[in-house]
DNA sequence: TAGATTGTTAATCGATTAACAATC
DNA sequence: TAGATTGTTAATCGATTAACAATC
């Protein structure tokens, strides 16, 4: 098996989304249906699943629950990860309050800012910390992943600091492109998908 | 020239960022330097620029300001576009207040929500409107692009509504992947870059 | 001139997809 | 069996990159 092709990893969460949707109503699913859900080609889907050593039944399709479990395992959904948010502005606060992170296995354990006006203020159950404490907290193992929600000018410096402290997975928050169906240009992205893909590579690089 | 390769379009904003940075200090720039800034290969850069029919000087490099202007023109930075934000939750409010949108040529002209508690509240100079008015406003030509900042469950329905009303460019806001330098997994994305690329394809599909 | 850097060719790579034999 | 769908091959495609002649 070794490392999955990058393009495959990107599609796995899209398959998973469909599988979660239909897991209670359908027993099996075809490569055609999975392809439709992921904006891919059926042959593409079959190839992806064979990379996972996951096999279907000719004439029938793939077991929905088995495939769901297989993909979950591959993406490492079993683990929860502690994450820090750097930047307590509009975006940082929005992310800290965003339930989707926790729902997908990411626990926000700290929020940092460099501005005295923000430090000490509360976001949910967290108190915004001085960014100068970031390196220590990180070295303590409080978290192993960070989300950047700082202005562009500060991003590089904060990134250097995080890397220095040993962080191996950083998400620099901003919108991103995924598909362009039909005549309409839609940048369809799902935070959960990105995080899962990120998590996958994070685990790989740690290994 | 016709249509640029997608991969090239994605890199143009990255070149532009460097060019903006150095336009006051340097006269010329080499494909090597551009490559470094964009996380690409020097040959790749030279090929990209030749797609633009933009030529450098052997032994010297490319004119910083001329290249900057050429890329700006290609990405259509000259135009401003009116954009609506759908969803006045944390994310929608953060985006509406985010100066980067305007700075990059996107004017937020309306914010919508379906929740009575949000409707009528103000965000900056805008008053949140009932999402039921969206189709009419859109048909009136108030905006030609929309940013989705609604929960995942509502995204599809809102998208259908936007498409129905004639919107051809939709940005579904969420984080997104770009590069994976060295041992650290960094999803380095820049809202402005995405918007510029989006704008490019938006203009192309309109043509 | 000598050094530097472009512009382009050709090889290579990763990913996609049509097609179809295998087989439930 | 007959219909459906997988698994895999082979062709194709878009993108990357080493290499180097052209040339400032």
Image: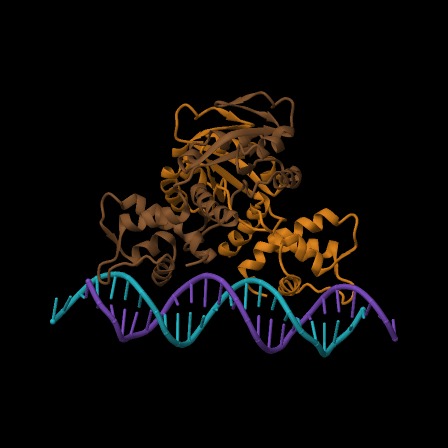
Chain colours: A brown, B orange, C purple, D cyan
Residue A117 can be seen, yes or no: yes
The residue sitting at 61% across, 28% down in the picture is: A113
For the N terminus of chain B, the quadrant is bottom right
Q: Is residue A139 above or below residue B206?
A: above
The part of the image, by quadrant, that contains residue A149 is top right
Residue B72 can be seen, yes or no: no
Image position, residue B42 (x, y; %): 66, 62
Of the pair B134 and C4, the residue shown nearer to us: C4
Image position, residue A61 (x, y; %): 25, 57
> Left or right: D10 with respect to B47?
left
Image position, residue B194 (x, y; %): 55, 47
Of the pair A81 and B77, the residue shown nearer to us: A81
The residue sitting at 64% across, 61% down in the picture is: B41
The residue sitting at 42% across, 40% down in the picture is: A79
Image position, residue B84 (x, y; %): 49, 38
> Left or right: A197 with respect to B41?
left
Q: Is residue A164 above or below residue A39?
A: above
């Amino acid at each position: 098996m070794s490392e999955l092709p990058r393009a495959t990893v990107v599609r796995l969460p899209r398959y998973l989304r469909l599988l979660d949707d239909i897991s209670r109503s359908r027993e099996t699913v075809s490569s055609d249906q999975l392809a439709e859900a992921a904006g891919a080609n059926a042959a593409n889907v079959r190839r992806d699943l064979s990379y996972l050593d996951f096999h279907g039944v000719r004439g029938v399709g793939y077991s929905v629950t088995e495939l769901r479990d297989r993909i979950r395992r591959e993406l490492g959904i079993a683990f929860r990860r502690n994450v820090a948010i750097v930047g307590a502005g509009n975006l940082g606060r929005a992310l800290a309050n965003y339930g989707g992170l926790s729902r997908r296995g990411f626990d926000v354990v700290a929020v940092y800012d460099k501005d005295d006006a923000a430090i000490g203020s509360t976001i949910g159950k967290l108190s915004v910390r001085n960014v100068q404490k970031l390196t220590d907290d990180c070295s303590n193992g409080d978290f192993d992943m960070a989300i950047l929600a700082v202005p562009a000018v500060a991003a590089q410096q904060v990134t250097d600091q995080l890397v220095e402290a040993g962080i191996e997975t950083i998400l620099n928050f901003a919108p991103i492109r995924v598909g362009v169906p039909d005549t309409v240009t839609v940048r369809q992205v799902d935070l959960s998908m990105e995080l899962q893909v990120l998590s996958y590579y994070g685990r790989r690089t740690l290994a």
